[in-house]
Image: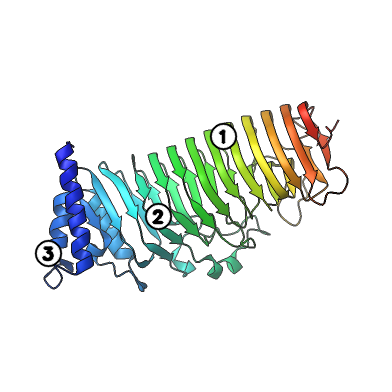
Amino acid sequence: MGRQAHLDLRLLFLLSMFCMASGFGRGVKADGRSLLQHHMAKSSNLFNVKSFGARADGRTDDSDAFTAAWKEACHSTGRVHLIIPKGTYTIGPLRFSGPCVNVTSLNFRGYLKATTDLRKYGSGGGWIEFAWVKGLTLTGGGTFDGRGAHAWPHNKCVTNSNCKLLPTNLKFVALNKTVFRGLTSVNSKFFHIALVECHNFKGSRLKISAPETSPNTDGIHIERSSSVYFSSSRIATGDDCISVGQGNSQVTITSITCGPGHGISVGSLGKYPDERDVSGLVVKDCIMTGTTNGIRIKTWANSPGSSAATNMTFENIVMNNVTNPIIIDQSYCPFTACTSKAPSRVKLSDIYFKNIRGTSSSEMAVLLECSKGIPCQNIFLEDVHLDLSSGEKLATSSCSNVKAKFIGTQIPPPCT
């Protein structure tokens, strides 16, 4: 598109926003839309959900309007922009599916509220799901409110491994070249944001929050994805701020402020057969405050299959009153009773903890509990300084089934 075409598109967009704000063009309708709005959407490839009947009053179910706007946008030609103006929209569950060859931008400025009727959701699905789209940019400063308080009492996953999964706020499936910037997710029923089979995904300036007591409300979960980058975001929730699951490669997480929550986790790994390996993870320049864990790697005992997690670096992390600042747990079991004593079959190797500093709220600041079946290899701790929050005595460290290598400052003293 040439420079003049870009200018014309911007002028048409500004004119449409002025007309909607001033009320000009109302009164003459065409299929529920003003003739002016209808013309603008058609001529400039701007698809405004209000032009498709969205009421944005916080009470009316606007799902049909969002679906219609996406359908028309997805099948249009040229550069396409889907607009969600300011307002409160009750919607969902919704699936925005491609391939949409020409959809390049979704601008969310509104406040989106999830329906609380759990009968409308399938197990493990999403409230809002994007699938099979390439080159999508989502911006605008809007908010996705999962209204999870209505659903959390129905979460049985804390005690039942065969539980029905509640819906994720935002689920991204098989996307490529995605930018997700400046948006807010609050009170998700389950995970806030989940990536599955995504590639070249960049998320930044996100705000994610749910009460500390909310179950399984991971801020960001990444699975079977590659070339993923999350940065400059604040996450306060009831579970992992970020969880890196199986099958990921080349994931970078930087400048994340985390707390409350369970910290940044790799895993859990090794729960299911045929899990893929994890490699190329970098976590750096992050701050953990009041979290249950800082950096945690967790794998299940008695893994049904073999896999590996390798080449991972955790660098320049500040821990403020964190219960378990550095922890490798290869006997992970979150349920009330786990009877298996078989060792984990997930191999951990080439893992670097560099410049980890701050305070631990528990005496055990460093715990490296590796698998007795496949001991950890090439675990490096360089310049670790973790004091007890209470100021009393020194923190301690513990190691099993690992010969870690210690470099530079080591507080607590290295375990043997």
**Image x and y of residue 83, in percent:** 28, 56
Q: Earlier in the sequence, mark 3 or mark 2?
A: 3
Which quarter of the figure is the C terminus placed in?
top right
Quadrant in which residue 310 is drawn: top right
Secondary-structure class at tag 3: helix
Q: Earlier in the sequence, mark 2 or mark 1?
A: 2
Q: Nearer the viewer, mark 3 or mark 2?
A: 2
Residue at image point 12% right, 58% down: 39
Residue at image point 82% right, 37% down: 412
Please state if 145 lies on the left or on the right of 158 as rendered: left
Task: Please state which of residues 260 and 162 is positioned toward the viewer in this rendering.
Answer: 260
Residue at image point 64% right, 63% down: 213
Residues marked 1 and 3 touching at CB (< 8 Å): no
Task: Please state which of residues 139 and 74 is positioned toward the viewer in this rendering.
Answer: 139
Q: Is residue 239 above or below residue 21?
A: above
**Image x and y of residue 359, in percent:** 75, 46
For badge 1, the amino acid type reads Arg
Quadrant in which residue 179 is drawn: top left
User: Residue 276, labelled with which disc?
Assistant: 1
Secondary-structure class at tag 2: loop
Please state if 193 lies on the left or on the right of 95 as rendered: right
Which quarter of the figure is the N terminus placed in?
top left
User: Residue 233, labelled with which disc?
Assistant: none
User: Residue 35, labelled with which disc?
Assistant: 3
User: Disc 2 to disc 1, how far (Cα)?
Assistant: 35 Å
Which residue lies most toward the front here?
391
For badge 2, the amino acid type reads Gly
Task: Please state which of residues 360 and 187 is positioned toward the viewer in this rendering.
Answer: 360
For badge 3, the amino acid type reads Leu
**Image x and y of residue 400, in percent:** 82, 35
